Amino acid sequence: MRLFPKLKKSPPHARDPAAPPRVLVSCPDFAAPSGGVRQLYNLVEGLREELALDAYVYHQTGGFRPAWFQSPAPVRYADSDALGANDIWVMPEVWGGAIQNHPEVRKVIFNQNAYYTFTNGYALPPAPSPFRPAEHGVRGILTVSEDSERVLRHVYPELPVARLRYHIDATRFQPGATKQPRLVYMPRKHPEEAMQVLNILALRGALQGIEIIALDGRSESETAGILKTALIFLSFGYPEGFSLPPAEAMACACLTIGYHGQGAREFMQPEISWPIETGDILHFARTVETVLDQWRLDPSPLRQRALAASAFIHRHYSREAHRASLRAAWQTVTARS
C-alpha cells in the first residue's frame, strides 16, 4: 500500500500542550478498497476496545471516510486537529521522510510491508545515509508477519519491533455451503502475470466451464460473498508484508494457489495450499490445471484440504490471538515512551 500522502507539517490550530494524550493512527484519504486501510481502522478499534486508549484514525481531509466497509473507529482530521506534544502518532511505513516532521511528538511505525520501507523517501547510495527512525522520535515498530519482523529487526536493532497478528473475521470469511466452478483473483498486483497464467490455461482448454472473476473495487462483504462460493483463488501478490487476500480466501475454503510473496509463507503451507515461487509462470499454470483436473475427477480430497486450510487460518488469526498480540506488542513498542 504505497498511496499515502505526506502529512501537512503545520495544521491550522495548535493543540494545548496540557491536553490529555491521544493515539492518532494516520490513514490515507483513499476511497478504493484496500486491505491496508482496513487494518488501520482495525488497529484503532483494538486500541480503544482492548487497551482503553483514546485512539483515532487520523485522515487528512475533513469529512473523509472510506465507504466500502463499516467501522466504529472515530476519526480526526489533520486539516483541523493538530498533533499535540502528548500524543502518540502511529505512522505507516510508506511515509518515509515524514517521520522527520513533528520532532516533539512520540511516534510508532505501523509497518504492514517491510519491503516498502526502503523505497519511499530514500535515495540510492552513495546519496546521504538514510535517516534512522530512532533519531526522529520513533519509539518502536509494529509489524504484521514473521517475515517482516525478521527484516525489521535486522535493519533496526536499536528499536523494539513487535508483531501484531491480524484477525481474519470468522463471521465474514468462512466456507460456503457449496462451491461453484469459479476461479477468482485480485488484479491490483502484477495483472500481467495473471494474464499470462490465465491465457496459458485457456489455450490448453483447462478453463472450460470455469467462471473467472477479478476481485477489484468490491466492498468487504461482496468480496467475502464471492470467496465463499469460489472454488479456486490465485495469488499474484509480491512482495507482501502479510498478504490478506490469500488468507481470506483460505478462510473461505478456496483452493489457494500462487505466490506467498514472503509475508504469506507462514500460512501458505504446502499441506493446505499450493505455493508457487515468484515468477514461475509455467509451474503456476501447470499447478492450476492439475488442481482442476483433480477436482473434475474427485473433488472430495480437495474439499478436505480446503477445509483444513480454513481451520488453520481461523485458529492462527482469531480475534483472541489478535487481541493478545496487540496487548503485548503495544507494551513493547511504547515502553520507551
Image: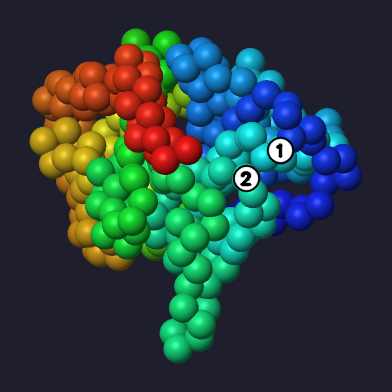
Q: Residue 318: percent from the left, percent from the top?
A: 32, 18
Q: Provide the residue designation for mark 1.
A: 84
Horizontally, is 143 left or right of 192 in the view? Answer: left
Query: Which corner quadrant of the image does residue 272 belong to?
Result: top left
Local secondary structure at mark 2: loop
Q: Is residue 254 above or below residue 94?
A: above
Q: Which mark is residue 105?
A: 2
- Farthest residue, direction bottom: 126
Mark 2, Cα crowd under 10 Å, few <14 / some 14-19 / many 20+, is some
Tell me the residue at 54%/65% (across/down).
Answer: 120
* Observer-nearest of 35 and 235: 35
Tell me the residue at 66%/57% (across/down).
Answer: 101
Horizontally, is 26 left or right of 92 in the view? Answer: right
* Observer-nearest of 75 and 304: 75
Query: Which corner quadrant of the image does residue 284 belong to?
Result: bottom left
Colour basis: rainbow
Mark 1, Cα crowd under 10 Å, few <14 / some 14-19 / many 20+, is many
- Nearer-N-terminus badge (1/2): 1
The amino acid beneath tag 2 is Val
Evaluate whether residue 286 shows in this view. Answer: yes
Tell me the residue at 81%/52% (across/down).
Answer: 10
Tag 1–tag 2 contact (CB < 8 Å): yes
Q: Residue 116: percent from the left, percent from the top?
A: 46, 59
Measured Cα–Cα span from mark 1 to mark 2:
7 Å
